[in-house]
Image: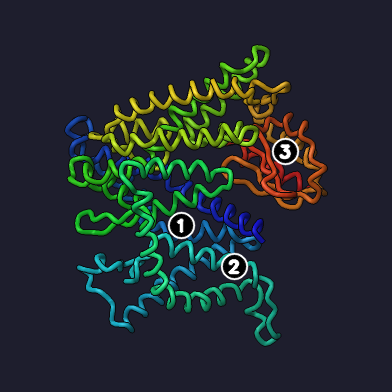
Amino acid sequence: MKSNFKTAIQTFGRSLLLPIGIMAPVGMIMGLMGAFTQGYMIETFPILDNETLQTILRSAQQISSVIFSNIPILFAMGVAYGMSKHEKGIAVFSSIISYLTLLMVMNVYLTVTGTMAEPDVMAEVGQATVLGIQTIRIDVAGGIIAGLLAAYVTDRFYRLRLPLAFAFFSGKKSVLILTFLYTIPIGLVLPFIWGLFTSALIFISPILMNEPFGPGIYWLLNRALIPLGLHHVLASVVRFTEAGGIYVIEGVQQVGILNAMNQVLFDLGPSHESWNRIMPTISPYLAGGQMLTTLFRVPAIGLAMYHTAFAKNKTIAKGVILTIVLTAFLGNITEPLEFSFMFISPLLYLLYIILVGITTIPLGIWDISIGYIRGTIFDFGIFGLLYENTGWFNLIIIGILNFIVFYFVFKYVIKRFNITTPGREEENRDVTLLNEKKYDRIAELVIESLGGRANIVNVDNCVSRLRIDLKDQDKFNDKLIKESGSSGFFFPKKKHIHIVFGPHVEFVRNEIDDLLKK
């Protein structure tokens, strides 16, 4: 039972990556367009002062904003797709039905109870107009609830058989009807639960949002949850709920750090009073904090690994280490590096977690106001250098200190405890197939290493790992998996293996699916 719960939580965490996956790149577009259309940027770069160009930029920003105006819908669809095991398309369709029904049921509740607020004060009492419906503002939580309900109803009733007279409504059609009916009591009970839930989140918010230790606590927990796949859940809670704080901007309440940043970063800009008041507080929980890892800590650890690699292995180790460092530096995917030592030395990973927490604390002290979600070099260029009053130089100073600390600590510990990091193994993995993008051959090796097609029960993946259920764990061949170019593997539970391929994982997964269908 405990194992099933853990698996469900991991799956839930992965499902959150779908909406976040679209928000990150579109957020970069919004940021770039928003920067180039604000007055201070036009004054700095007169070439931007062109009516046609400004119309194009504002239009692109407006088009991009549709993603952030409908975040709950994105989460409803993403969670439904990720959590459902069968008929994922029906689950996604049902999630929209559930979300719309939820909004209207709460609207009816407000009307019947006489608690419907006037439009000019509804934000102050936690109400908002969503898709034209005035309702209780539950934001992303509403989407998640709708997605979970849709996934549950789909998996349970997609094969429902009704009497012949009602046969037309059997099977998949029944899912849509039942989702609608199940949502009604939830919408009536939710206002009471939401009140208690809001109080609990506000209660723990001072811990996560504490100044100056909050960012350190948050990133320590974030890194600690990576082996369980729960770091995405923590991030979403802080980004979209009261646990991340409630901010009043221009007379409107913004719940969660990401909603607050969206308004300040994209709508108001560095000249607005909320920039200096809010951005230094929330930036360390988003790209500001992530940049310390992707731009400074990961390169430092990679360099320490290279310098501690055996002389005979340095050539191969350099290619492996450079790949995983660039994956983080350019793509904000840190897991390949973290998995390179996470399970071979839990002590080193524990030290890594503690160091991350401690060395993030200065972000809560120094004035740094860099957006957005991701922590790549591109984010630094767009949201750090192109915007004013970001304190990017302070981030570099803290980052250099992080680089020094992580480099020397990792170099010492790796040598002192003889940890088998890349380049210190007797046998090194061959990344030739990955470099040449021969994903079909990699898939063949993975399937063979797992004991063949007959031994594979289910194949899934997250942002960097294959997650595969097996019939017989003893048939696994670790030598073959090394030939595939995988940067690591582990069994989080019996008969369930994770194989790390970093940014290549989805291409490998597609080839495996194709081979299993033959």
The residue shown at (51%, 59%) is: 77
The residue shown at (82%, 42%) is: 475
Note whether 479 is above or below 310 in the view shown.
below
Residue 456: x %, y % from top left: 77, 49
Residue wearing tag 2: 152
Which residue is more in the foreground, 402 or 409?
409
Q: Secondary structure at mark 3?
A: helix
Say which mark, if any, is on residue 74: 1
Viewer can see residue 65: no
Q: Secondary structure at mark 1?
A: helix
Residue wearing tag 3: 443
**Residue neighbourhood size for the residue with mark 3, other residues' Cα within 10 Å, grouped as few (<14), some (14–19), many (≥20):** many
Viewer can see residue 306: yes
Say which mark, if any, is on residue 129: none
Q: Residue furthest bottom?
A: 165
- N-term mark: 1 or 2: 1
- N-term mark: 3 or 2: 2
Corner quadrant of residue 420 = top right
Looking at the rendered structure, the kind of residue marked 3 is: Ala
Which residue is more in the foreground, 276 or 164?
276
Q: Whole-Å distance between the Cαs marked 1 and 2?
A: 18 Å
Which residue is more in the foreground, 53 or 513?
513
Note whether 416 is above or below 134 in the view shown.
above
Residue 206: x %, y % from top left: 34, 52
Q: Whole-Å distance between the Cαs marked 3 and 1?
A: 31 Å
Looking at the rendered structure, the kind of residue marked 1 is: Leu
Q: Nearer the viewer, mark 1 or mark 2?
A: 2
